[in-house]
Image: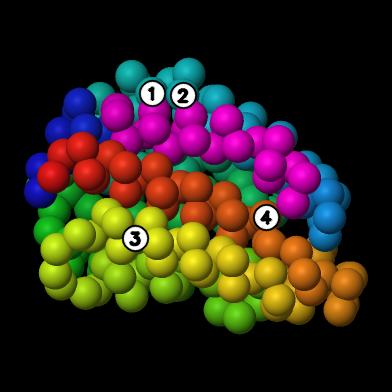
Amino acid sequence: MMIDREARKLLFETVARRVIESAEELTDLDRAIGDGDHGANMRRGFEAVLASVDELSAKNLGESLKGVGTTLVMKVGGASGPLYGTLFMSLGKSLADDVTQEQIAEAFAAAIEAVKARGKSDVGQKTMLDVLFPVLGVLRESGAGLPLRLKATAREAAERTVPMRAIRGRASFLGDRSIGHMDPGARSSELIVDAVADVMEGFA
């Protein structure tokens, strides 16, 4: 598939707006098991992405993704900035404007490994990885209806963090009290996947 300037702009705008409009929900989730700033931090970062979307989307896909990642590192506070920044910057290292699903999956796998290393975390620890890894599994599958499968998988994966006990991050300080709450990073990851899938549906 060809991800040209128009598609890149729509992609970044859709993702940014989805996160921004969900900031209060993310704050509420983080207030339950964290320090309550995930929503505000993510909104600030993606408002910066939205403000520079024309400049970002004018670059090729790889450079534009790196630009988004750099923006998030600079503007998003807490642990989320470095983690989401790492995700986008890693994706930008190997993706060209004309990409296949297989190439996207390979780049996404590498990006997940980079996030794991950056956060010293793994799947099953009640983090964003618990959404990203199942999404990778869908990307590696063939068949029709990819956007819908991505959305359903991301949502189900975020829900599965509710009964988990947090092992990493501020929520881990709560021990068993972290059980019963969705991880805010898992939810923000789901929002991003959902927005990307919406754009994919439009270009299908």
Residue 33 percent across, percent down from the top left: 82, 60
Q: Which residue is mark 1?
A: 53
**Which numbered disc, 4 or 1, marks the residue closer to the eye?**
4
- Secondary structure at numbered mark 3: helix
Of badges 4 and 3, the one in the foreground is 3
- Quadrant hosting residue 186: bottom right
Q: Where residue 119 appears, x then y in whole percent?
A: 63, 67
Q: Quickly name the residue at label 4.
A: 184
x and y percentages locating residue 113 in the rendered image: 45, 72
Q: Which residues are magenta?
A: 9-29
Q: Amino acid at mark 4?
A: Pro
Q: Earlier in the sequence, mark 4 or mark 3?
A: 3
Label 3 is placed on what type of residue? Leu
In this rendering, the answer to whether 41 lies above or below 79 is: above
In this rendering, would 136 be left or right of 21? left
User: For the residues marked 4 and 2, what is the alpha-carbon distance in whole angstroms?
Assistant: 22 Å
Residue 6: name its quadrant: top left
